[in-house]
Image (cartoon, grey):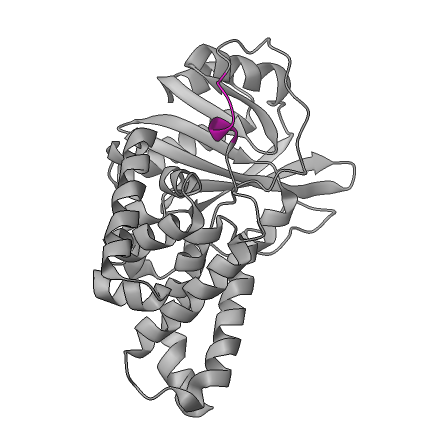
Amino acid sequence: MTDFAAETEPFRPELLAHCYRLLGSIHDAEDLVQETYLRAWRGFGRFEGRSSVRRWLYKIATTACLTALATRARRPLPSGLGAPADDHRVPVADAEPSVPWLQPVPDALLDPAAITAGRAGVRLAFIAALQLLPARQRAVLTLRDVLAFPAADVAGMLDTTTDAVDSALRRARTRLAEAALAEDDLAEPGEPARRTLLDSYVDAFVRADPGALVKLLRADVELEMPPIPTWFTGRDAVVGFLASRVLREGRWHLVPTRANGQPALVEYARTESGFEPHGVQVLTLAGDRIARITAFNDPALVPAFGRAPARDSRPAVPDA
């Protein structure tokens, strides 16, 4: 047991990122990583070092994820289901809790080195685009382009040929190119400017100041709010929606954190009982402006970012 833990535990954070890329859910990814380690522990006595421990674990994890995906629907964002609205006065569709929506992942659960070296591999736009691919293409592309495994290694993990891997990779790259991942090309500001922008956004949001928000958003900013299918594009529409339906002074408490290698905020909403978990916002920055706000209105996500607040006081700051 000691040898097993010593040889396998260092790979847990990167395996979690891998399962998250394939599944689009932090909760499902954590479950599949646990299943991976259970399968590995059971087979460790038969592991004879024919490959590296890392490659062996990735084979087990990928197989487990593909088996799970055979019976699960893809996890979209609202932007993957329909066109945006450019007028905040349009009727907003009812929430769709039955849709298995894409979820964010806390940076704190991932390997910091992996985030720094390959941040595009965990960014929200990339994870959303991956959900457009068939499961096997999703696996091939992440193993080859994100993790840089050789084609022969990927073929061994998937029990197929290198020709089949190369073919699946070409189709996956073509599909992602069609998705036009412009967000991944946006240049984020340096740390001081990023902190100033985030602090200004939190201040404007908490004070319910639409005029201050206007100065922080790009003209083509987008807002989506799963599980609500309706989403908005354009600064007028986004600020108009927030001002008329979301912002109320004293209603929100936002705690800065990181998700998907991006700035994020844990949301707490005031209720009669005090502040309660509400969800997580993930922000996409471009220069000194915010290009996209993805507000995951799901209180069940908050515990992954830290402890829940006390019911009768201001929220405790989550561990981030």
The number of numbered discs placed on residues in the rendered structure image is 0
Q: Is residue 112 magenta?
A: no
Residue 28 falls left or right of residue 164: right
- To which quarter of the image does residue 156 belong? bottom left
At 36% from the left edge and 83% from the top edge, which residue is drawn? 7
At 43% from the left edge and 52% from the top edge, which residue is drawn? 22
The residue nearer to you, when weighing 179 against 294, is: 179
Residues drawn in magenta = 78-84
Report x, y in % for residue 68.
54, 58
Report x, y in % for residue 111.
35, 62
Report x, y in % for residue 286.
29, 29
Query: In this picture, is 309 found above or below 85?
Result: below
At 37% from the left edge and 68% from the top edge, which residue is drawn? 58
At 32% from the left edge and 73% from the top edge, which residue is drawn? 54
Query: In this picture, is 123 found above or below 160?
Result: above
Residue furthest right in the image: 272
Q: Is residue 267 visible?
A: no
Query: In this picture, is 199 found above or below 31?
Result: above
Q: Is residue 18 visible?
A: yes
Report x, y in % for residue 217.
38, 21
